[in-house]
Amino acid sequence: MTLPVQLAPSILNADWTRLAEQIAEAEAAGVDWISLDVMDGNFVPPITFGAQMAAAVRRLTSLPIEAHLMVEHPEDQIDEFIDAGVNCVTIHVETTRHPHRLLQRIAERGVEAGITLNPGTPLSEIEAVLPICDRVQIMSVNPGWGGQRFIPESLARISRARSLLDDCGRESAHVAVDGGVNESTIAGIVDAGADWLVAGSAVYNDRESVSDAVARLRRALPL
Ligand code: DX5
């Protein structure tokens, strides 16, 4: 099964002083999701925002919203983000001793359950939860900042994640990629097996409009 490629701009690199406009521009450009990079200053050094931002973004767009929890103790955050109206919660396997239980709880609340892992974490760490995941997100940069270079070893991890999901009957689950997705990396990422792409600085930057940036990414997709 080949899943259609979906683009999910991360607002991490957007101009927060005009967030409503920036999200509307992305929506008008035809993106599929909005991704929220939630950082707590512990799991990763920066601090971004909490569930209140998710609730604000919920009021700004009809697009589905994904919350990428780069936080310690995600169990303390899940319900607030779901109550705020997000459509997917993605947790880091490194941040909990009970990933299976947390993913079950996310799914029981009726939203997509995602598992993600840092570039240095073996894929074996998530194998046991694949049957209950709606997506595996391969971090192709070390999390915390936008605008970093894509880690090329991620391509093999993307392909492996796709194979592992297919092998456990999760052909409809997404392989997401987050970090360094841009015009020059996107074709290889999709060819490796990814279908759900987070893009921050490739969409929100001072070089071009959001519309032009999204069109550039779409043109770079493999035929
Ligand atoms: C973790 C964040 C970033 C962001 C995308 O650092 O999750 O990966 O979403 O940033 P870009 O697309 O600029 O690498």
Image (cartoon, rainbow, N blue to C red):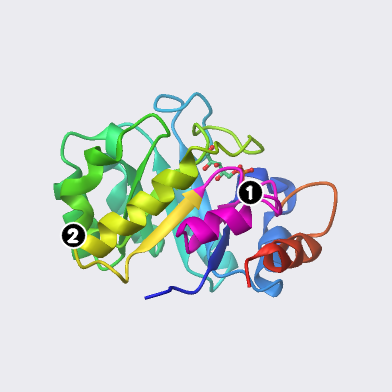
Magenta residues span: 178-203
Identified at 73% across, 68% down, the residue is 219
Q: Earlier in the sequence, mark 1 or mark 2?
A: 2
* Residue 175 found in image quarter: bottom left
Q: Look at mark 1 in the image and give the residue it sits on.
A: 200
Three-letter amino acid code at disc 2?
Pro
**Between tags 1 and 2, which lies in front?**
2
Question: Relative to 161, does residue 72 appear above or below in the rendering?
Answer: above
Q: Where ligand 1 lies, by quadrant? A: top right
Asked if residue 197 lies in the magenta stretch, the reply is yes
| Residue 131, label in figure | 2
Asked if residue 151 lies in the magenta stretch, the reply is no
Mark 2 closeness class: few <14, some 14–19, many ≥20 residues within 10 Å: some
Q: Disc 1, ligand 1: is the CB inside 8 Å?
A: yes
Q: Secondary structure at mark 1?
A: loop
Q: With 210 as the anchor, is 97 left or right in this view?
A: left
